[in-house]
Image (cartoon, grey):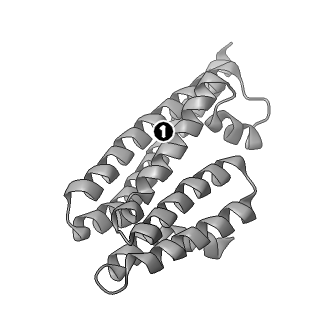
Amino acid sequence: MVILLLATLAYPLAVYFGYGRVEPVWLGLGLLGLMLVRAWAARDPVWLIAGAGAALLGLLGTVGNSWLPLKLYPVVVNAVLLAVFAASLVRPPTVIERIARLTEPALPAAGVAYTRKVTQLWCVFFVVNGSVALGTTLWASNEVWVLYNGLVAYLLMGAVFGIEWLVRRRVKARMAAERNYA
């Protein structure tokens, strides 16, 4: 599973290094195969949907021998994640609440409210990140596309994780202090 994750994360680099060196059909077949294996290995509805979308892009890249569908993969990933996170806002528990309950099963109401806000934050992130990914696909050079989708997007995601972790520590400390005063 680790190899599949690393291959997925390295995808923008494969597109960059393959561009002009190999026909898109080969990378399309690679993406199609990678996503089918990943969806099968995960057996999770989210990855099945993401895998189907990526497999469709791989198929379109293969059939049309075109780079455009292959460069749209980061857009599809953001769209799928946005759909999952947004759906959990409509039909709770939210994705972040489910993750939080893995370590804190008796999550208090204030914690549930906080996880809802974090889920909303991730929805905004996926909209912005997916929009930039789309913009780099349609209007930027291959170098800008790979820089954003292969590095900057991951750094931004890490920054959101890190900042949220710091905020969460403060929120938990404040909630603990309020419980001690009550």
Q: Seen from this angle, which residue lies furthest front?
A: 63
Compared across the picture, whether 153 is left or right of 81 comes to left
Looking at the picture, tell me which residue is in the foreground, 181 or 48. Answer: 48
The vertical placement of 144 against 171, above or below, is below
Compared across the picture, whether 49 is left or right of 54 comes to right
Looking at the picture, tell me which residue is in the foreground, 118 or 11. Answer: 11
The image position of residue 182, as x and y in percent, is 68, 12
Q: Amino acid at mark 1?
A: Trp
* Image quadrant in which the N terminus is located: bottom right
How many numbered marks appear? 1
Residue 95 in sight from this viewpoint: yes
Looking at the picture, tell me which residue is in the foreground, 49 or 65. Answer: 65
The image position of residue 158, as x and y in percent, is 45, 55
> Disc 1 marks which residue?
122
Which residue is depicted at the point 40% across and 69% down? 12
Compared across the picture, whether 17 is left or right of 112 comes to left
Compared across the picture, whether 24 is left or right of 33 comes to left
Where on the picture, by quarter, is residue 37? bottom right
Where on the picture, by quarter, is residue 150? bottom left
Which residue is depicted at the point 68% across and 25% down? 92
Near mark 1 (Cα within 10 A), the count class, few <14, some 14-19 or many ≥20, is: many
Where on the picture, by quarter, is residue 39? bottom right
The vertical placement of 11 against 39, above or below, is below
Q: Secondary structure at mark 1?
A: helix
Q: Seen from this angle, which residue lies furthest right?
A: 105
The image position of residue 154, as x and y in percent, is 42, 59
Q: Seen from this angle, which residue lies furthest top?
A: 182
The image position of residue 116, as x and y in percent, is 57, 27
Which residue is depicted at the point 53% across and 45% down? 80
The vertical placement of 38 against 102, above or below, is below
Which residue is depicted at the point 65% across and 25% down? 112
